[in-house]
């Protein structure tokens, strides 16, 4: 049987496990207990009790907190629930709403890792005296020649490295990911071996605060008036129809446009300021260069000063593609990415993550502004 010994952490040391109530984090905790560590579990409460009771099948819902506590009780370690409702609302939900209102396509799961889980939760773990914070993410933390490195998981179908590109070097040194070296099927087997009640619990699929997938209603509720009608316009300026709100559209969308055309048309640009949804052919979606803001690097910036050939992902579900990354020498938070072959359906607000083979080198947020 494989032993899940943590790098640089001795048996008996205190570690904290971030527990969402799902299979992955529960198994991560169980493996740590089995390996002989002194474990404490921490779960975040992201919604008020009344709202939480309605949420099922989504991360950090009411049932999930109960499930996390049951696992902790069964395995015999303390479990703490932290109220992060206001922080989550401000840092994640409101940012999601603002981003969509600007015509972007945000990724709240990355914001949650960056601004909640790997910030305040990590600090809490340190305050409790834990030597490391363990999570159930499917990524690998490997020790390089000079520092710890973030790598893609063994199971590419479950790999979550794209969602963790904002992880800083200091955070990475403290984090541990025991599931990065095994497939999901093995995680389920461990859950059954430990006789955990959540062994067959389904994975959460939706954005946790949009469990029914209806993000438009969430935006409209928090930002009344966001659903303002406007024109659907061809790139040549021809008005082809009307829409009921730009927030209902995303770059690359083809279906549900409500217009007729002799050729397939796609959403190629969204202009919320003028309430326009601009459409064109697939050729109009082609992008050779993109610009990034708020870049986070896990490698020295000098590597990118003259342009560095690597692979990048612009969507979590896409395979990495070849590109050259150039980081601004005067401000390393800005970068330009040149694709070897044009990409289609690139949306502002999405993340672009850099890889060298399986290692994460960094990434940034796609923006319209041309910094370089």
Image (cartoon, rainbow, N blue to C red):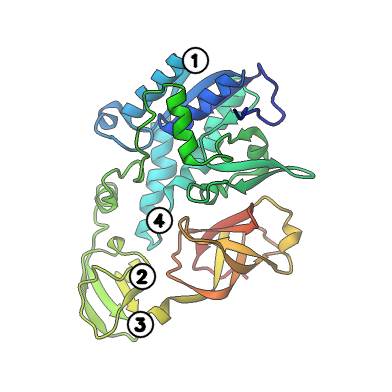
Camera-side mark, 3 or 2: 3
Q: CA distance from mark 3 to mark 2?
A: 12 Å
Report the residue that reaches farthest toward the front.
Answer: 1
Question: Residue at 44% across / 46% down in the picture?
Answer: 109
Secondary structure state at the residue bearing disc 3: loop
Mark 1 / mark 3, whichever is N-terminal = 1
Position above or below: 206 against 326: above
Q: Position of residue 357 (x, y in %)?
A: 65, 57
Q: CA distance from mark 1 to mark 3?
A: 59 Å
Q: Is residue 34 left or right of residue 346?
A: right
Q: Position of residue 33 (x, y in %)?
A: 56, 19
Q: Which mark is residue 277?
A: none
Q: Which mark is residue 99?
A: 4
Q: CA distance from mark 4 to mark 2?
A: 13 Å
Q: Which mark is residue 235?
A: 3
The crowding category of the residue bearing disc 1, from other C-alpha atoms within 10 Å (few below 14, some 14 to 19, many at least 20), is: some
Question: Residue at 42% across / 55% down in the picture?
Answer: 106
Secondary structure state at the residue bearing disc 2: strand
């Amino acid at each position: 049987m494989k032993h899940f010994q943590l790098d640089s952490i001795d048996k008996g040391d205190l570690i904290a496990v971030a527990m969402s109530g799902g299979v992955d984090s529960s198994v991560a905790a169980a493996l740590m207990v089995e390996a002989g560590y002194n474990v404490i579990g921490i779960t975040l409460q992201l919604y008020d009790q009344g709202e939480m009771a309605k949420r099922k099948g989504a991360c950090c819902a009411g049932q999930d907190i109960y499930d996390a506590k049951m696992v902790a009780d069964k395995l015999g370690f303390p479990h703490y629930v932290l109220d992060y409702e206001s922080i989550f609302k401000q840092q994640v939900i409101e940012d999601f709403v603002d981003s969509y209102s600007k015509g972007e396509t945000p990724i709240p799961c990355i914001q949650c890792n960056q601004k909640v889980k790997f910030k305040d939760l990590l600090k809490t773990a340190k305050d409790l005296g834990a030597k490391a914070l363990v999570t159930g993410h499917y990524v690998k933390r490997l020790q390089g020649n000079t520092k710890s490195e973030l790598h893609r998981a063994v199971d590419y179908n479950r790999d979550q490295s794209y969602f963790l590109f904002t992880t800083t070097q200091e955070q990475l040194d403290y984090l541990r990911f025991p599931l990065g070296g095994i497939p999901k099927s093995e995680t389920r087997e461990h859950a059954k071996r430990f006789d955990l009640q959540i062994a067959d619990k389904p994975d959460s699929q939706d954005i946790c605060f949009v469990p029914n997938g209806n993000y438009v209603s969430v935006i409209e509720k928090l930002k009344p008036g966001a659903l303002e009608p406007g024109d659907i316009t061809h790139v040549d300026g021809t008005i082809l129809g009307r829409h009921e709100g730009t927030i209902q559209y995303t770059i690359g969308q083809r279906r549900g446009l409500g217009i007729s055309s002799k050729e397939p048309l796609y959403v190629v640009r969204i202009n919320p300021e003028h309430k326009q949804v601009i459409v064109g052919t697939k050729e109009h979606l082609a992008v050779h260069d993109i610009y990034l803001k708020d870049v986070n690097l896990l490698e020295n910036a000098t590597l990118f000063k003259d342009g560095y050939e690597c692979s990048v992902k612009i969507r979590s579900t896409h395979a990495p593609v070849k590109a050259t990354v150039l980081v601004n020498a005067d401000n390393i938070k800005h970068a330009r990415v040149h694709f070897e072959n044009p990409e289609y359906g690139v949306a502002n607000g999405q993340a672009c993550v850099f890889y060298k083979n399986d290692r994460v080198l960094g990434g940034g947020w796609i923006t319209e502004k041309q910094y370089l």
